[in-house]
Image (spheres, rainbow, N blue to C red):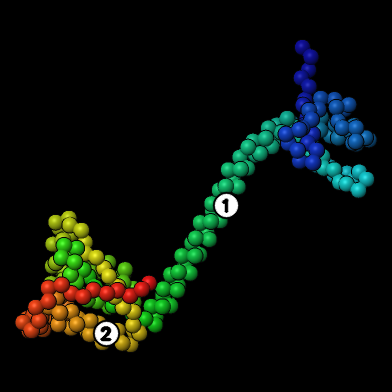
Amino acid sequence: MAPRKLIFHVVVNNDMDDSMSITAVDDFPDDLGEYRESIFAQMNGKDYYKSQLVLMQGEDFITYDFYSDRAWIDAVKQQAVEPYQEREREEAKLQEQEYWKQEGVRESRVARGAEFSFIYHVVDRETAHPVYVGRSVNVDTRIQQHLNNSRTLSGIPKLYGYLSKILEEGRDVPIVRVVDRVPRALAEREENAEIFRLIREGVLLFNKESVRATTRARALMNISIPTEWRIEA
């Protein structure tokens, strides 16, 4: 049986789709000239070989890549997975950009929160009426605290009793509606003003501040549907 001839591969100018198979010195491109024998001798007998030669022809540079059979298989595999790797790199880049974008939004919210506070209503879904007025620099966090505390019935008795019952019965939680943004220094005053505005309209609230005033306000005014408004984002 004749000995197996090793197959080498030559790629010119990175054109992997037009490689040349080498089984003898004469198979090398003529442009390699005197380099052919030395390259073949260097590659012959090596199980894994990869090398590159750059020659200048006229005013142009020509790149020759040499692969043994095993090295060529690895190169072909790499070429096949490169589009997927590139897509993964792009996806990772987009995810990183989105992360820093969200970080910027978060930092901006924190900065705004350091100067402003938000006045919000907790609105019953069935009646569409506010049942509570609150203030917070971070409304989402404050509402989550209300929901958590309602499970232990600690804090604001009427509000948390109301929320606890809704959660136990599996009903939709109330709507949270931000109605104003005010300087933090004035937040408590504006919250109280909003509470008593609704009380004067006959709205029943769970706020501590409204417990004693509600009966008197309801007797003075019989308004069953409050005037609702919200601030622009």
Which of the two labelled residues, at mark 2 and mark 1, occupies the earlier sequence position? 1
Image-quadrant location for residue 198: bottom left
Residue 36 tag number? none
- Residue indicated by mark 2: 190
Residue 208 appears in the rendering: no
Number of callouts? 2
- Residue plotted at (63% across, 37% down): 80
Residue 233 rendering spot, x and y as whole percentages: 38, 72
- Residue plotted at (69% across, 37% down): 75
Residue 160 rendering spot, x and y as whole percentages: 16, 69
Kindly identify the amino acid type of the residue bearing the numbered disc 1: Glu
Is 107 situated left or right of 227 in this image?
right
Residue 77 rendering spot, x and y as whole percentages: 64, 36
- Residue plotted at (90% across, 36% down): 32
* SS at badge 1: helix
- Residue indicated by mark 1: 90
Q: Residues within 10 Å of mark 2 (few under 14, many from 20)?
A: many
Is 44 situated left or right of 197 in this image?
right
